[in-house]
Amino acid sequence: MIDSMDEISLVDLQNQDHHAWTEFMRQLRLIVCKACSGISDDFIIDEVVQEASIAFAIKIQSNSFELTSKLSTFMYSIARNQFLKLVKKKEIDVELQPDEIGAIEESQEELIEKEKLFELIENHLADLGEKCKELLTAYYHLRKRMTEIADELGYANAETVKNMKARCFKTLKQKCLG
Amino acid sequence: MTDEEKDILQDKALFEEANENELEQHKLLMNSDSNYKTEFVLKEGVARASAKGFLEKALETPVISIWSRRSTWQAIAAVLVVVFASTFLFDEFRSANQFATAELQELPSSSTELFGRTAGVSRSGDVDWRRLFDEGEYELVVNELSWLSVAGLDSLETNLSEIRQILEMRLDQYQAHVYSHANTSGQGLTETLLANEIDSLRIELSKLENEIDGAYQGEEELSTLRFALALSKLKSNASEASQDFGQYEFEWMLGDSSNYPTGVAKVDLIWYSSLSEYKAGDCEKTHSVISELVKYSDSQYFRRAKKFKRKLERECDLD
């Protein structure tokens, strides 16, 4: 067990190391508790831990991702941002800094709509079939290039991947939006 | 801008690879082109859903999915097994299961605690279920009280039902006589005869009412026994094979019973009912029961019920 999130290796996290992620989640909860302005409601803490960890899991796969501060500082800012979104979405009664109130550009309605759409995507992604899911995951989450995907998933070339990606995305859109 | 150009711009914005101009253009389209915006959110959603999968793999457990609104109860059940197996994750992500488990541990563990020192259930000559209950022999209590419920409760209910039938019949007869008396008094029948008949019917009714009062008292006692039975099932893990955690008893007490168990309020029953339905794995029913409980804003369960309800909604794909 470690005392600080900063002791965790970013490479281990990128490589899905179980021990690193277990420690990360434990430390993240402590950070989230601080980022939530003293709110101790489990529901809020859980939700912010969830969203912050997902946001981080997306970010670390980006080719352009570079950690310019301590991991704990970085996670605090993500957690705070997610908390502010939640405050806006759920109209949580909490005192905020004046500059934080307008920090979230999306309206409450937009945040709620987005949440609903995210749920639909989660439900329908599996319906697309393993090939589409694999391809969309490789592209949108793991941020792999078309040529890389073609090599790894056995497509003829980048153009085939591009067409396939467009088809998969179109199907997902139809499934989610009718 | 062509669709393909829009697609590329969305991807760049999503991957945080857009330059200042591109970012400006992206923001403009997000505010002016609803289709562009929807597609962008869809892409965000794909990245998000995939990231959840990534986390599940990293954590070597589907625990991440308990955060989200799951579509099936089975998914939660699968998660709960993992949560039980992993103390860390159990502590880390407070699921409805963790919440319910903690609440189950808080349930009364002795009959004294359950019924108070004075308001006990006593059926002298019956099995010493109370001692067994205090000793935590829930399986034995369940067995013994099940026997009681067959031998005692059922016969009393049958009796009560018969009494009610007789009462209804007599009431009909009584009404008929009164009606008959009103219609025939002018036809020469002696009023004394009718008055005597009505008096005798009243006496009979009074007797039946007393009998029914007694039956109701018995029903309260049996409700209390039934409550103890249900609670012991709820606390016990012995019923796991049969998936019987007292949910049927609690439901019966809340629905058909005219008497609550001694020293037990309706909110207590609703609370226990929700825990038993949860333990039995019925997410929707648990939610339905807990939704009833949050209507009682001044009850001791109000805050806990609200919390439990929120957790369920998150986990069980319930609106």
Image (tube, rainbow, N blue to C red):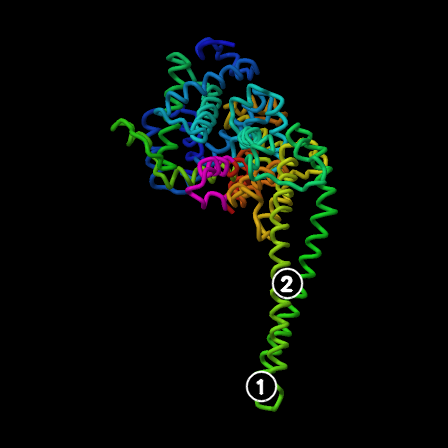
Query: Residue B183 got which mark?
Result: 1
Q: Residue at x 59, y 84 (%)?
A: B191
Q: Position of residue B255 (x, y in %)?
A: 58, 51
Q: Is residue B196 above or below residue A10?
A: below
Residue B233 vs residue A150, the one in the foreground: B233
Q: Position of residue A79 (x, y in %)?
A: 40, 23
User: Does the segment drawn in magenta span residue A125?
Assistant: no
**Tags 2 and 1 on a common chain:** yes
Label 2 secondary element: helix
Look at label 2 and name its amino acid.
Leu
Residue B64 vs residue B247, the one in the foreground: B247
Chain letter, disc 1 residue: B
Chain letter, disc 2 residue: B
Look at label 1 and name its amino acid.
Asn
Furthest toward the bottom, the residue is B187
Q: Of the residues under marks 2 and 1, which one precedes in the sequence? A: 1
Q: What range is drawn magenta here?
A: B291-311
Count of numbered badges drawn on the protein = 2
Q: Which quarter of the picture shows residue A158?
A: top right
Residue A162 vs residue B99, the one in the foreground: B99
Q: Position of residue B111 (x, y in %)?
A: 60, 34
Tell me if I can see residue B183 in this picture: yes
Residue B78 vs residue A64, the one in the foreground: B78
Q: Position of residue B183 (x, y in %)?
A: 58, 86
Q: Nearer the viewer, mark 2 or mark 1?
A: 2
- Label 2: how many Cα within 10 Å (few below 14, some 14–19, many 20+): some
- Relative horizontal placement of residue A157, taking residue B20 as reference (left or right): right
Q: Which residue is mark 2?
A: B208
Query: Label 2, label 1: how many angstroms apart (C-alpha)?
Result: 27 Å
- Relative horizontal placement of residue B22, taking residue A43 as reference (left or right): left
